[in-house]
Amino acid sequence: MLKIIHYIPDIDRSHGGTTTYIQLLAERLGELSELHIVTHLTHNPIDIKNCKIHYINRNIWGAMKREWLEILNDVKPNIVHVNCCWTPQCAWVQKWSQALNYKVLLTPHGMLEPWIIKRNYWTKKLPALLLYQKKAICKADYIHATAESEKVHILQLGYNDKVEVIPNAVNVESIEMKDSWKRTNNILFLSRVHEKKGINFLIEAVVTLKEELKGYKIIIAGEGEPAYVATLKQMAVDLGVQEQVVFVGGVYGNEKWKLFREADVFVLPTFSENFGIAIAEALASGTPVITTNGAPWEDLIKYNCGWSTKIGTAATVNAIKEFLMLDEAALERMGRNGRKLIEEKYSINAMAEKMMKLYSKLL
């Protein structure tokens, strides 16, 4: 049985997709391998099954290296799998491992997408590239992308051409699908509250469609930096839609799934996603989705279960208008189509088995 160590900077519940990814992957991968997850302690770490979790010091100039090397020596893994970019800890874990001839797989989780690289480029990204990040990408034994579009962007950097695509997944068998598509007049955003998610476009769309959306509640669910959340709340007040746009904070467990099922449509007007697990969760719940071409979800059109639009307010307005014109029978068809898409293409069994094949390829 292969021994795998995953390094991820944190598994905090507030950090969205990467945390959900490692939790879902471990559920099946931990049955196919001896799985260890090495991370750093935060305020709200999630529980992950089928693995052993190791918490180590975060200070790369302090105890982190010693504790990391002790785990390597104790576990003696076949593969070290590094998740995320831009934090020096990720690059140094890779460097320390490769110095001992361990094979390293790097999963950037969308952090090498053009929008991400351009953001704070001169103050943060360029210094990181020069100091450690470019070297880490170049030296990775393989890079794991979660969508063909992400692979294209990684190859365009010209740093490493060994890139394999394995989509993220959800445990669709455990997700209850709604049994009614009778309108509840709820429109849902549920994800990390972050600038890249384009929440401002949704708020601006509500302003444009204020009359058409009379009686609707737009629910913004998720955690984020308090200052940014406050900015969005003030934006809703300034635009006069604070009664329609409701911020409910982080939601988890049954409360989260209840929101997915009770929404008429799920909206993620994002600038950039390497996958978008919340999209998959909404579809598995039977809820149609509106997102942008910043997310790799062209299948929404192919399967007739949602809208993939340009990025911006106008495109979001047009998609919501189309959604408002649908009757309940059409919403049900779209909801069932979305569930079928997830069942056919995005199961955790398929993801874990493909990952095991990639590990074997590395070896």
Image (spheres, helix red, strand yellow):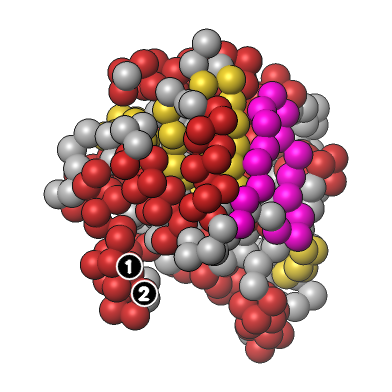
Query: Crowding at label 1, few (<14), some or many (≥20) Cα neighbours within 10 Å?
Result: some
Q: Is residue 235 above or below residue 135?
A: below
Query: Crowding at label 2, few (<14), some or many (≥20) Cα neighbours within 10 Å?
Result: few
> In screen coordinates, is 222 left or right of 289?
right
The number of numbered badges drawn on the structure is 2
Q: Position of residue 175 (x, y in %)?
A: 73, 28
Q: Position of residue 241 (x, y in %)?
A: 71, 77
Distance between the alpha carbons at the discs numbered 2 and 1 = 6 Å
Of the 4 image quadrants, the one containing the C terminus is top left
x 27%, y 34%: residue: 141
For the magenta stretch, what is the residue range?
Answer: 42-57
- Give the residue pinned by disc 1: 128
Q: Position of residue 285 (x, y in %)?
A: 70, 33
Task: Say which quarter of the image contains residue 347.
Answer: top right
Q: Residue furthest left?
A: 158
Q: Position of residue 128 (x, y in %)?
A: 32, 67
x 27%, y 71%: residue: 126
Q: Is residue 71 visible?
A: yes
x 29%, y 50%: residue: 136
Q: Residue furthest right?
A: 254
Kind of residue at badge 1: Ala
Q: Residue furthest bottom?
A: 238
> In screen coordinates, is 155 left or right of 78?
left
Task: Say which quarter of the image contains residue 310.
Answer: bottom left
> In screen coordinates, is 161 left or right of 78?
left
Looking at the image, do the residues carrying marks 2 and 1 touch, with CB atoms under 8 Å apart? Answer: yes
